[in-house]
Structures are given as C-alpha cells and as structure tokens.
Image (cartoon, grey):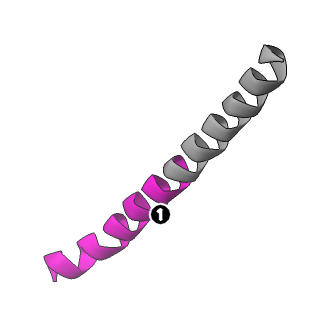
Amino acid sequence: MKHLSLMPVCDVVYARAITCEKMNEYEDSLFKQFYEFGGH
C-alpha cells in the first residue's frame, strides 16, 4: 500500500524534471541566438 502511494509523487517529480530539462534547452538556444546575434 505504501509503495502505491509513492507512485504519483514519482510521476510528478519525473514530469517536473522533464519540464526543467526543456526549460534549460530553451534557455540555452535563446542564449546562443542572442550571442550569435550580438557577435556579428
């Protein structure tokens, strides 16, 4: 029973980790565009 109650928490943490990863990728691409634009 205790193991089952932990599953939704794991799902939330996993989903949040994916969201953070996507945000980091977005910020990286945004920074690269800004850097290339400012460098030329």
- Please tell me whether residue 33 is drawn above or below residue 18 in the rendered image: above
Residue at the (39%, 70%) spot, across then down: 11
Residue at the (34%, 65%) spot, across then down: 9
Q: Circle 1 sits in a helix, a strand or a loop, which is it? A: helix
Q: Quadrant of the N terminus?
A: bottom left
- Span of residues in magenta: 1-20
Q: In which quarter of the image is the C terminus?
A: top right
Drawn side of residue 39 relative to residue 3, left or right: right
Q: Quadrant of residue 38?
A: top right
Q: Where is residue 21 in the image (x, y as percent from the top left)?
A: 50, 50
Q: Is residue 4 magenta?
A: yes
Q: Which residue lies furthest to the left in this view?
A: 2
Drawn side of residue 23 relative to residue 14, left or right: right
Q: Mark 1 points at which residue?
A: 15
Q: Does the magenta stretch include residue 5?
A: yes
Q: Position of residue 33 (x, y in %)?
A: 76, 32
**Residue closer to the observer: 25 or 38:** 38
Q: Quadrant of residue 30?
A: top right
Residue at the (25%, 70%) spot, across then down: 6
Residue at the (76%, 26%) spot, across then down: 36
Drawn side of residue 26 relative to residue 20, left or right: right
**Residue closer to the observer: 38 or 11:** 38
- Please tell me whether residue 35 is drawn above or below residue 18 in the rendered image: above
Drawn side of residue 31 relative to residue 40, left or right: left
